[in-house]
């Protein structure tokens, strides 16, 4: 059976999954804890990416090299950037771009040097399943009717975006480069690139914790503490049951 890695950025997001893990076995490697076990009938490894692209790349590489995972699924939170992407909505990624990557004029803005590409895709089949699981998970949570499920491009960078002007500038610059992004976070593009290198399926879902604006630093911790884990549990359960 293919082992599924479930990556979260923060312990608060992972907590609920950890409590449900059966036959849990913890190992430490590269300064990180990896939890092997079974979840909803599937063999899994739960791990924390930590925060930022380099940390996420290290965790992803360890999962592949050491723990023999066959797919990686990321659950976490993100700041909403696109029109109509509101706090409490859910975004399933189809592709990732690194908004802070700029090797111009040697390479075009946002292009990852020597890959000849600016975007790294998520796996289409796994993403379709994650989208379906997110739909089912949201229905089960009985959220307000205005809660929306989006899917599309996500941007990652080593920066917590927490200002109205900053988020506008980011969105405008990305748009000029041809990238209409729905949400911004700090890890997904790195995991997508590692999975691309190893030829492993990757999918990612993020609940919107803030609008990357002047109140983002207040909205984010409240959301992470009170809500993020519930979304992750519901979506992961539906996904694993469908695999
Ligand atoms: N993750 C959640 N909110 C974020 C934000 N505003 N910027 C970057 N990463 C985030």
Image (cartoon, grey):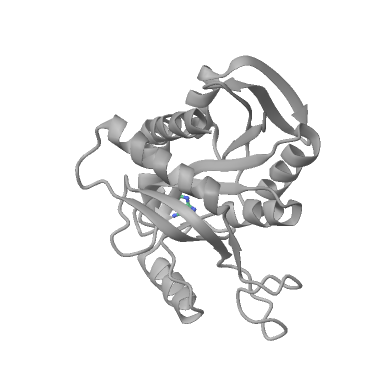
Q: Which residue appears at 36% of the width and 54% of the height?
A: 150
**Label total for image:** 0
Q: Closer to the camera, 172 or 95?
A: 95
Q: Closer to the camera, 25 or 121?
A: 121
- Position of 130 relative to 44 (above/below): below
Q: Which residue appears at 48% of the width and 32% of the height?
A: 242
x then y, percent, for residue 145: 19, 43
- Position of 163 relative to 14 (above/below): below
Instruction: Kindly give the residue lying farthest to the bottom in the view shown.
Output: 105
x then y, percent, for residue 212: 40, 58
x then y, percent, for residue 146: 21, 47
- Position of 169 relative to 14 (above/below): below
Q: Quadrant of residue 73?
A: top right
Q: Which residue appears at 48% of the width and 34% of the height?
A: 239
* Quadrant housing the N terminus: top right
Q: Quadrant of residue 105?
A: bottom right
Q: Closer to the camera, 221 or 75?
A: 75
Instruction: Kindly give the residue lying farthest to the left in the view shown.
Output: 145
Q: Is residue 120 left or right of residue 242?
A: right
Q: Quadrant of residue 99?
A: bottom right
Instruction: Kindly give the residue lying farthest to the top in the view shown.
Output: 23
């Amino acid at each position: 059976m293919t082992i599924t890695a479930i990556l979260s950025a923060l312990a608060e997001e992972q907590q609920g999954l950890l409590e449900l893990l059966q036959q849990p076995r913890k190992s430490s490697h590269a300064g990180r804890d990896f939890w092997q076990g079974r979840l909803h009938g599937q063999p899994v490894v739960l791990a924390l990416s930590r925060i930022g692209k380099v940390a996420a790349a290290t965790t992803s590489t360890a999962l592949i090299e050491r723990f023999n995972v066959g797919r990686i699924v990321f659950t976490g939170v993100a700041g909403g950037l696109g029109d109509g992407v509101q706090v409490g909505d859910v975004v399933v990624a189809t592709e990732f771009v690194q908004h802070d990557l700029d090797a111009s004029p040697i390479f075009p803005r946002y292009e990852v040097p020597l890959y000849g590409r600016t975007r790294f895709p998520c796996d289409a089949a796994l993403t379709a399943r994650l989208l379906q699981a997110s739909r089912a998970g949201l229905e089960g949570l009985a959220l307000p009717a205005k809660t929306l499920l989006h899917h599309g491009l996500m941007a990652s960078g080593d920066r917590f975006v927490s200002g109205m002007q900053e988020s506008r500038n980011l969105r405008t610059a990305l748009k000029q480069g041809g990238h209409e992004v729905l949400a911004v976070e700090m890890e997904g593009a790195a995991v997508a690139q590692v999975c691309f290198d190893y030829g492993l399926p990757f999918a990612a879902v993020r609940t919107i914790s803030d609008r990357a604006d002047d109140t983002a630093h207040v909205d984010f911790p409240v959301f992470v503490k009170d809500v993020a884990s519930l979304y992750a549990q519901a979506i992961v359960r539906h996904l694993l049951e469908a695999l």
